Amino acid sequence: MKKYKITVLVLMLLIAFVSCKRNTATTSINNTKIAYQCPMKCEGEKTFTIEGSCAVCKMDLKPLASSSQKTSSKVVSNEISDESIFNLTSQWNTEEGNVIKLKDLKGKTLVMVMIYTTCKAACPRLVADMRNIEKQIPKKYNKNLRYVLVSIDPETDTPARLKIFAKENLMDDEHWTFLQGTKTSVREFANVLAVKYKQISPLDFSHSNIISVFNPQGELVHQQEGLGVDNKETVSKIIETVQK
Ligand SMILES: [Cu+2]
């Protein structure tokens, strides 16, 4: 009887040891495989080996394999009509107080970015990036181009506020347009651009830093991601698109 008990005990210990070992094995595989990155790429391509939150934007780091940002960094679409942002039916207020739909911008190459005017961190740099791009495009194309800044904070960024912002940032010419939507339309538009944003306090959002180029049919032809990144490719893509 005693011998039987010991055998059972040994068996149980063995099973416990085996299952324990299996657990550690999977964990270590997971640890070595996954790299984490800020979904907003606040620190560029920098990756981390453990989960946590971004030191810059405070968003949760995402496992790199499941990051959709990578694939969306350059999208060339074939399905013209279905992929066009002109399918979106939402209405927007411009900084001039006009009410428009995105399809009212049809026929122009669109350079679009999502920002909010009370942003102290990324948006001033994104706005500078937009101006830097605009400066490199020959002026003769301006009539066939529209640089569009969509507010991710429609509650604060009223048309009047956007107008002031436009003037302050010397973006008040006709080829610049600022848009105020609704919370729903802004979220919908952000999803189309693969822009992520999250309100973290009443006047603060963490958000992706993506500048998108659309052809005159409203199809996405190029995206650049990051702050102060090399925009040569974006500039040549805009010129190529506007010349078509
Ligand atoms: Cu910002």
Image: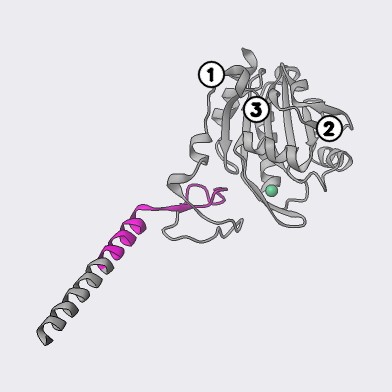
**Tag in front: 3 or 1:** 1
Q: Kindly indicate the quadrant of the structure image that contains residue 19.
A: bottom left
Task: Kindly tell me whether mark 1's CB lies below 8 Å from ligand 1.
Answer: no
Q: Earlier in the sequence, mark 2 or mark 3?
A: 2
Task: Kindly tell me whether mark 2's CB lies below 8 Å from ligand 1.
Answer: no
Tell me which residue sits at (31%, 59%) in the image: 26
Residue 77 lies in magenta, yes or no?
no
**Tag in front: 2 or 3:** 2
Which residue was labeled with disc 3?
136
Q: Position of residue 93 (x, y in %)?
A: 84, 33
Kindly identify the amino acid type of the residue bearing the numbered disc 2: Thr
Which residue was labeled with disc 2?
94
Residue closest to the eye, 127 or 97: 97
Evaluate if marks 3 and 1 touch, with contact meaning CB atoms under 8 Å apart.
Answer: no
Kindly identify the amino acid type of the residue bearing the numbered disc 1: Asn
Which disc number belongs to residue 78?
Answer: 1
Kindly identify the amino acid type of the residue bearing the numbered disc 3: Gln
- The region drawn magenta spans 21-46
Tell me which residue sits at (66%, 34%) in the image: 132
Tell me which residue sits at (54%, 22%) in the image: 77
**Tag in front: 2 or 1:** 1
Q: Secondary structure at mark 1?
A: loop
Q: Position of residue 205 (x, y in %)?
A: 69, 52
Q: Work out which quarter of the rendered image holds the N terminus and state it.
A: bottom left
Q: Position of residue 177 (x, y in %)?
A: 78, 30
Evaluate if marks 2 and 3 touch, with contact meaning CB atoms under 8 Å apart.
Answer: no
In this rendering, position of residue 140 left or right of residue 5: right
Q: Position of residue 216 (x, y in %)?
A: 67, 18
Q: Secondary structure at mark 2?
A: strand
